[in-house]
């Protein structure tokens, strides 16, 4: 049986609450704009690798690759600085919480290498890794037709683990389920 899988960093309850409070102002501003689908708070995460549909037999190899990655890194500090439209340089189709991290790109690169070493088939991205959290989706729209929403923020958190997640698609959007959380090196018990 195949499962739609991805590897992500899940947010803490505290950071979810802080983001929720800020996004409410934007939600009110965009309430008249049709077609904007805000992502449920419980589904917020930072995707590092989208694996697509994988046979269940692949899950142990994926977990092994995640573990080989997490033991080499401390839990990263993630900084969020701005709520804006994304992706940059295109007609926007999302509302993003843009961020940065000192070592998240290195973690992603190592994870890609470990997945390849475990012979897990997935499509590697050829674009630079951009730290962002998707807050809402909509059809691509000209930026000038959207209200200004840019807000500077100062949120930060340290995820404890790198998580293997399953995405189940429904007519109302995707639902996400944790398969396994693997703690970063210094947090292992």
Image (cartoon, helix red, strand yellow):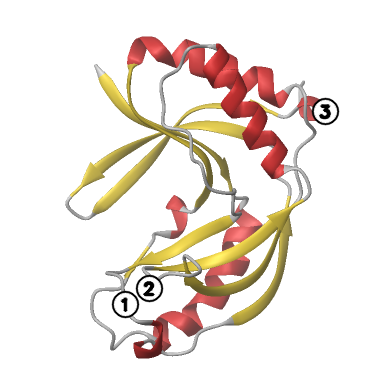
Instruction: Left or right? Give the position of 188 relative to 164.
Output: right
Instruction: Left or right? Give the position of 24 relative to 174.
Output: right
Q: Position of residue 55 (x, y in %)?
A: 31, 16
Task: Identify whether 106 is placed above or below 87.
Answer: above
CA gap, disc 2 to disc 3?
Answer: 41 Å
Quarter containing the N terminus: top left
Q: Nearer the viewer, mark 2 or mark 3?
A: 2
Chain-order first, disc 2 or disc 1: 2
Chain-order first, disc 3 or disc 1: 1
| Residue at point 46%, 59% (across, down) | 41
Is disc 3 surrounded by few (<14), some (14 to 19) or many (20+) residues within 10 Å?
few
Kind of element beneath mark 3: helix
Kind of element beneath mark 1: loop
Q: Which residue in the structure is indicated by mark 2?
A: 91
* CB contact under 8 Å: marks 3 and 1: no
Instruction: Left or right? Give the position of 98 relative to 39.
Output: right
What label sits on residue 141 in the rendered view? 1
Q: Position of residue 180 (x, y in %)?
A: 52, 25
């Amino acid at each position: 049986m195949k499962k739609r899988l991805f590897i992500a960093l899940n947010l803490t309850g505290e950071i979810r609450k802080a983001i929720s409070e800020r996004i409410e102002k934007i939600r009110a501003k965009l309430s008249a704009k049709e077609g904007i689908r805000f992502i449920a708070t419980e589904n917020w995460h930072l995707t590092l690798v989208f694996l697509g549909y994988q046979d269940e037999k692949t899950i142990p190899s994926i977990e092994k690759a995640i573990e080989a990655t997490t033991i080499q890194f401390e839990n990263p500090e993630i900084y969020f600085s701005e709520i804006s439209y994304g992706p940059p340089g295109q007609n926007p189709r999302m509302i993003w919480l843009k961020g940065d991290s000192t070592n998240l790109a290195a973690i992603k690169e190592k994870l890609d290498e470990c997945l390849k070493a475990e012979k897990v088939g997935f499509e590697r991205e050829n674009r630079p890794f951009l730290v962002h959290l998707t807050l809402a989706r909509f059809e691509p729209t000209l930026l000038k037709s959207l209200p200004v929403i840019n807000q500077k923020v100062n949120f930060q958190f340290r995820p404890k683990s790198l998580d293997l997640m399953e995405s189940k698609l429904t007519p109302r959007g995707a639902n996400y389920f944790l398969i396994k959380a693997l703690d970063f090196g210094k947090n292992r018990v």
